[in-house]
Image (tube, rainbow, N blue to C red):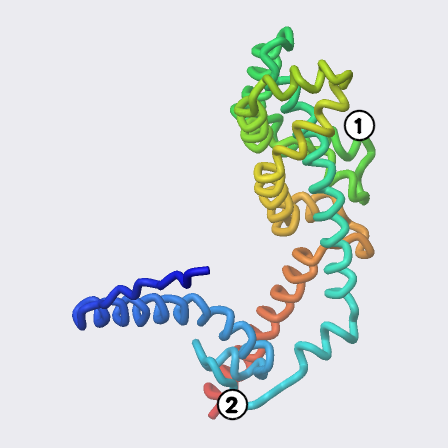
Amino acid sequence: MAKTKTLKVKRSPADQAVQVLIYVIVGLFALITLLPFIYIVAGSFATERELTERAFFLIPHTISMNAYDYIFKTGDAIHGLKNSIIVTVVGTFINMFFSCTLAYPLSRPYFKGRTFFTNMVIITMLFTGGMVPSYIMISNVLHLKDSFWALWLPGAINPFNMIIIKNFFQGLPMELEEAARMDGCNDGQTFLKIILPLSKPVIASVSLFYAVTHWNSYFNAMMYISDKNLEVIQIVLRRIIFLSNRERIRLGSIRYAATESS
């Protein structure tokens, strides 16, 4: 067999200098994006006084493990992290189940009334019940307060994400569904064996949207969860930040009083 020769493109010194400059600029931007994360890690090992006195630092003067001692001794953060994982995983599954099962019939041209039901979904994007009616419905009517269902069911379907899935389903060739019906598949088998395997890109993307929403959400948990055993990590972090800010104010007032007395 004849050996294939690889062609090497010779670059001029100007092209090489431009490429090096691009690498340097991209590397600097990458370092800039890492600075907040480095500051967070450095602040976790710093003392409370250093956090109060120094506006920004990457290396603490004094290494302190008080923050980690507090997290692991109380166990609130670990318990909240476990609850957040449960809420995110189960909530994302519920979201995808309802979104996909609603998007599939609405994407089929032979489904009667699909325009009406699609418009009903779009209306929910424009008009919502509001915070007070939603709270009354979830707490007093459905009796879901102090349960994870209060975090899952109200947002079981996001209309925007459902429409994204619906549009993707519409882009799949109808000939695949017709071929599946000729092979004896019913609607459920066609959906599970044909549509879903071909829709892995949109399923992965929308699942990520739902998961990030569940993980970062704290307002619903703050309204509907009063049981400390069911608190998610966002509520625990909010309480820790509140207590740390109050401690900073107390230390600042003590130092101010000491300077005034002197």
Indicate which disc, 1 or 2, sits on the residue closer to the N terminus: 2
The reply to whether callout 1 and callout 2 are in contact (CB within 8 Å) is no
Expressed as whole percent of the image width and height from the top left, the position of residue 125 reads: 54, 26
Q: Residue at x 69, y 42 (%)?
A: 92
| Residue lying farthest to the front in this orientation | 1
- Label 2: few (<14), some or many (≥20) within 10 Å? few
Observer-nearest residue: 160 or 251?
160
Observer-nearest residue: 154 or 158?
158
Residue 133 visible in the picture? no
Q: How many marks?
A: 2
Residue 220 visible in the picture? yes
Q: Residue at x 82, y 56 (%)?
A: 229
Determine which quarter of the picture holds residue 250. Answer: bottom right
| Residue lying farthest to the bottom in this orientation | 262
- Which amino acid, mark 1? Val
Observer-nearest residue: 29 or 39?
29
Task: Kindly report the distance in space between the C-alpha atoms of the residues bearing marks 1 and 2.
Answer: 55 Å
Expressed as whole percent of the image width and height from the top left, the position of residue 41 reads: 56, 75
- For label 2, the residue is 61
Q: Residue at x 58, y 39 (%)?
A: 201
**Is residue 20 placed above or below 214 in the rendered structure?**
below
Q: Residue at x 63, y 60 (%)?
A: 238
Expressed as whole percent of the image width and height from the top left, the position of residue 62 reads: 56, 90
Expressed as whole percent of the image width and height from the top left, the position of residue 141 reads: 80, 27
- Given this view, does label 1 or label 2 mark the residue nearer the observer? 2
**Is residue 89 placed above or below 112 in the rendered structure?**
below
- Which amino acid, mark 2? His
Question: What is the secondary structure assignment of the residue under circle 2?
Answer: loop
The numbered dot on residue 43 is none
- Label 1: few (<14), some or many (≥20) within 10 Å? few
The numbered dot on residue 141 is 1
Determine which quarter of the picture holds residue 118. Answer: top right
